[in-house]
Amino acid sequence: AQKVTQAQTEISVVEKEDVTLDCVYETRDTTYYLFWYKQPPSGELVFLIRRNSFDEQNEISGRYSWNFQKSTSSFNFTITASQVVDSAVYFCALSEASSNDYKLSFGAGTTVTVRA
Amino acid sequence: NAGVTQTPKFQVLKTGQSMTLQCAQDMNHEYMSWYRQDPGMGLRLIHYSVGAGITDQGEVPNGYNVSRSTTEDFPLRLLSAAPSQTSVYFCASSNPRGTQYFGPGTRLTVL
């Protein structure tokens, strides 16, 4: 069974503050993929990042960074120097490679509000 | 490329009515899927397809049918709409690396 937990329901910060979103997952597979998606107020789902289970290297993309730790089954996401445009719901998701069908299990999402 | 397109964007149905949500992709992806999004529950998989002629059930398939006659199209049918099917529906397609790209969504209300 797959399970993704995003314990933070809502986070509110002032512009330029850093914000970290937590994601904890459960899987019995040794090979799996982790994702983050962004859903802005307009409603579409925007792909942000994909990480393989065998690649624990952290990644930075502009103001976004991701910390993947297999030892704690976590894949946390940090927005540095947040901006109002970062206000959105962020989803963490898991896919198991063994099933070969790319099914995604999503967390419940974290709503980030960045105040000017 | 248009990516993944969905029609309609909004729909209101009465209980018992049937309808089809359309989904198309122009990226030649083999894998396509349908999710529903409900408040506080994230997205849940309804049905998916790994190629033309092949479909399978996801986490919440009851009340929905799908078919996949072409690579491009993956329609979702509601046979007899119920208020519990009020939701936002997303179609997605996946590249060979497994990254799923989503359509803009259809907001469905069943009265």
Image (cartoon, helix red, strand yellow):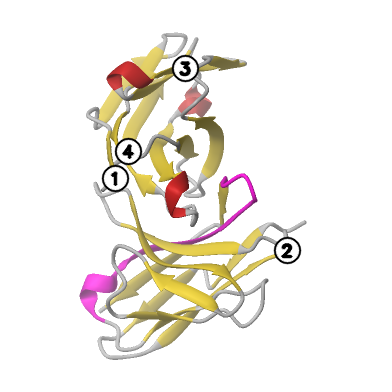
Q: Are marks 4 and 3 on the same chain?
A: yes
Residue at horizontal 35 percent and vertical 65 percent from the top: B58
- Amino acid carrying label 2: it is Asp
Q: Which residues are magenta?
A: B82-99
Q: Nearer the viewer, mark 2 or mark 1?
A: 1
Residue at horizontal 48 percent and vertical 74 percent from the top: B55
Q: Indicate whether residue B95 is drawn in magenta.
A: yes
Mark yes or no: residue A116 visible: no
Cα distance, mark 3 to mark 2?
32 Å
Q: Which residue is mark 3?
A: A79
Q: Are marks 2 and 1 on the same chain?
A: no
- Given residues B61 and B8, the one toward you in this image is B61
Q: Are marks 1 and 4 on the same chain?
A: yes
- Given residues A91 and B70, the one toward you in this image is B70
Q: Which residue is mark 2?
A: B26
Numbered disc 3: what chain? A
- Amino acid carrying label 1: it is Gln
- Amino acid carrying label 3: it is Ile
**Residues packed near mark 3 inside 10 Å, few (<14), some (14 to 19) or many (20 plus):** many
Q: Which residue is mark 4?
A: A109
